[in-house]
Amino acid sequence: DISASSMENDVKMLGHFAALFSALMWGMAFVSSKVLLQYFEPVEVLFIRLGIGFLALFVICPHLLHIKDRRQEIWFAAAGLTGMCIYYLMENISLTYTSSANVCVIVSMSPFFTAIIMHLLYRDNHLGWSFFLGFVMAIIGISAISFSGQEMQLNPLGDLIALGAAVMWSIYCVILGKIGTFGYNPLQTTRRTFGYGLLFLLPVIAVTGFNPDLNDLA
């Protein structure tokens, strides 16, 4: 059927555009976070960021998410802890020690770790030589772009924290894949993970303090 094929192509194009837009926003986030960290603490940047995102998602999709099975709540909490809280906190902390280019390249390794985790969990997920070759070529390309016109400077502590963030994001992606099988609205599931991320940040704030000067946002 021609109409069905055309619709399928449109959906694929929309998916490619969404992925491209996400990659653009992802790249900009490292630079903007680096600038914000000159005025705010890592936990302050993260809390404000998640708070704005949570409220924006409520405006876009105000409907509450009704969980079908309470056991699914564990997956949302795990996603909020790994992807919204620990990952972004580690990313922000790493940016205070090393360059945004370093963090960008290191965090770009997360798909590699995701594939490894998926392979360990599901043995049918075969990793051939083409996967490893493609990974190396991708990292070389990302590095060439990120370090264009500048010398790469390693910072063991910051780079190691960024590597931990990459692993944490990989775990989050695996969890997110599980949540995707529940059949909920993506906006609602994202908002719920944001909510858990904010919740898990509260103990961190209690220990480190939270006193941002919002005038610096201007």
Image (cartoon, rainbow, N blue to C red):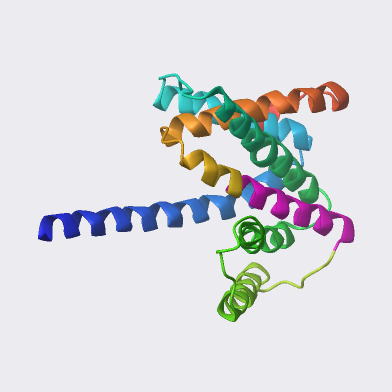
Q: Quadrant of the C terminus?
A: top right
Q: At 88% across and 61% down in the image, what residue appears?
A: 156
Percent of width and height locating residue 177: 52, 46
Q: Nearer the viewer, residue 211 or 18?
A: 18
Whole-percent x and y of residue 199? 69, 23
Q: Is residue 137 above or below residue 18?
A: below
Q: Residue at x 57, y 76 (%)?
A: 134
120 within the magenta span: no
- Residue 132 in the figure: left or right of residue 25: right
In-front residue for pair 101/198: 198
Whether the magenta-drawn stretch holds residue 164 is answered as: yes
Q: Quadrant of residue 121?
A: bottom right
Q: Which residues are magenta?
A: 155-173
Q: Is residue 218 visible?
A: no
Return the x and y of residue 87 as percentages of the image width and height: 70, 44
Instruction: Name the residue at 48% across, 27% down.
Output: 56
Q: Quadrant of the N terminus?
A: bottom left
Residue 105 pos. (x, y %): 68, 64
* Location of residue 211 (image quadrant): top right
Quarter occupied by residue 88: top right
